């Protein structure tokens, strides 16, 4: 009951400063051995078939696990979060809302920090102490990312796996840092990948379980996982509020684009995969990325957890073959 669930990245430092365990519900869902079963459970509870798989997964995770309370990001993440949380109130959950201001206004975000700190009874000094402590692990995440695109020592899957977990550090930042350090030391002894095709992955993390494996079997490697990298808070910031203002994901496509275009050039990327989730409002943003990104771009849609379907495999294969020529 010491565990605090949340629907997307929030200032995890506040939860840690309160002596609680942060748990990103998305990570529990996608790593669940019966993720598909969780979706069925949500549908049996009444979730419509045409609701995003992640939302159904999050509902089922929260409904079947014990959390002391849940933090719901009401602005800056998902248009379905309000209804998701309302159905969890029915289950007896205490919900703490959090909102990223769309205009990225510092004062408005500070107010959100203050509310969350008051809820968890955390003061400024306690927050700063944890924030400073996490600098080391965040630096390791940056190192992992550099070793992926610059040194070519780390696969797209390994990069994804580590960075996607940086939203909650698997509940224990010290253990996460130890494991990551060991992994990086091992990776330094590898021979570099010789990529035929270098890909960028933009969009929410894939619901497919074998996406990276399939891409690599086709002679390509993902050298940029956009949102997963954002979860690790990749920029140096002067204070915690600034860190979450620099974080691009909650502030829309036009806040994400400068980071995306900068990294595409830096990482010498050949092509971009824009992942979209079936029934997600973010599919509309594909129009913007197609217009603004001046590299070949494949839009890939996923629905339920599991392996890539044959149509998506074929589309990936054609895209990668085209980039090889
Ligand atoms: S994929 Fe889209 S609809 Fe689904 S949880 Fe994420 S933001 Fe919401």
Image (cartoon, rainbow, N blue to C red):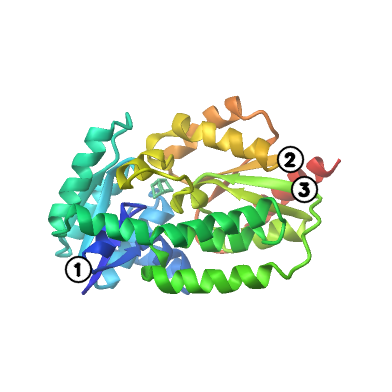
Marks 3 and 2, how far apart at CA = 6 Å
Looking at the rendered structure, the secondary structure element under dot 3 is strand
Figure check: 239 above or below 215 = above
Tell me where residue 292 sits by quadrant: top right
Q: Are marks 3 and 2 in contact (CB under 8 Å)?
A: yes
Identify the residue shown where x is 81% and y is 56%. Answer: 194
Marks 3 and 1, how far apart at CA = 46 Å
Label placed on residue 319: none
Residue 94: horizontal and vertical position, in percent?
15, 60
> Which residue is more in the foreground, 183 or 28?
183
Label placed on residue 270: 2
Identify the residue shown where x is 57% and y is 63%. Answer: 209
> Which residue is more in the foreground, 65 or 177?
177
Tell me where residue 106 sits by quadrant: top left
Residue corresponding to mark 1: 68
N-terminal of the two: label 1 or label 2?
A: 1
Q: Residue furthest right?
A: 325
> Which residue is more in the foreground, 277 or 251?
251
Residue 30: horizontal and vertical position, in percent?
46, 64
On screen, residue 248 versus residue 323, left or right, reads: left
Figure check: 254 above or below 156 = above
Q: Quadrant of the N terminus?
A: bottom left
Identify the residue shown where x is 24% and y is 48%. Answer: 83
Label placed on residue 197: 3
Query: Can residue 160 be seen by looking at this rendering?
Result: yes
Q: Residues within 10 Å of mark 2 (few under 14, many from 20)?
A: some
Q: Residues within 10 Å of mark 3 (few under 14, many from 20)?
A: many
N-terminal of the two: label 3 or label 2?
A: 3
Identify the residue shown where x is 16% and y is 48%. Answer: 115
Marks 1 and 2, how far apart at CA = 45 Å
């Amino acid at each position: 009951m010491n565990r605090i669930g949340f629907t997307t990245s929030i200032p995890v430092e506040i939860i840690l400063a309160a002596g609680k365990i942060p748990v990103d519900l998305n990570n529990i869902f996608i790593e669940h051995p019966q993720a598909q079963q969780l979706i069925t459970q949500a549908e049996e509870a009444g979730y419509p078939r045409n609701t995003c798989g992640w939302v159904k997964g999050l509902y089922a995770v929260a409904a079947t696990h014990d959390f002391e309370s849940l933090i719901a990001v009401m602005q800056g993440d998902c248009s379905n979060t309000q209804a998701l949380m309302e159905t969890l109130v029915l289950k007896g959950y205490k919900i703490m809302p959090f909102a990223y201001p769309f205009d990225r206004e510092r004062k408005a975000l500070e107010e959100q920090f203050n509310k969350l700190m008051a809820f968890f009874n955390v003061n400024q000094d306690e927050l700063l102490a944890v924030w400073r402590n996490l600098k080391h692990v965040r630096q390791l995440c940056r190192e992992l990312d550099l070793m992926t695109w610059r040194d070519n020592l780390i696969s797209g899957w390994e990069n994804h796996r580590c960075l996607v977990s940086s939203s909650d550090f698997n509940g224990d930042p010290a253990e996460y840092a130890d494991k990551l350090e060991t992994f990086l030391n091992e990776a330094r002894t590898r021979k570099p990948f010789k990529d035929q095709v270098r890909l960028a992955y933009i969009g929410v993390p894939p619901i497919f379980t074998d996406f990276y494996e399939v891409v690599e079997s086709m002679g390509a490697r993902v050298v940029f996982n956009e949102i997963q990298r954002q979860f690790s808070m990749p920029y140096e910031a002067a204070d915690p509020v600034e860190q979450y203002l620099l974080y691009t994901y909650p502030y829309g496509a036009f806040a994400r684009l400068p980071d995306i275009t900068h990294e595409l050039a830096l990482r010498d990327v050949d092509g971009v995969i824009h992942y979209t989730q079936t029934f997600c409002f973010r599919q509309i943003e594909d129009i913007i990325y197609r217009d603004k990104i001046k590299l070949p771009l494949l839009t890939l849609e996923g629905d339920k957890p599991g392996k890539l379907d044959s149509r998506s495999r074929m589309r990936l294969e054609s895209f990668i073959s085209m980039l090889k020529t």
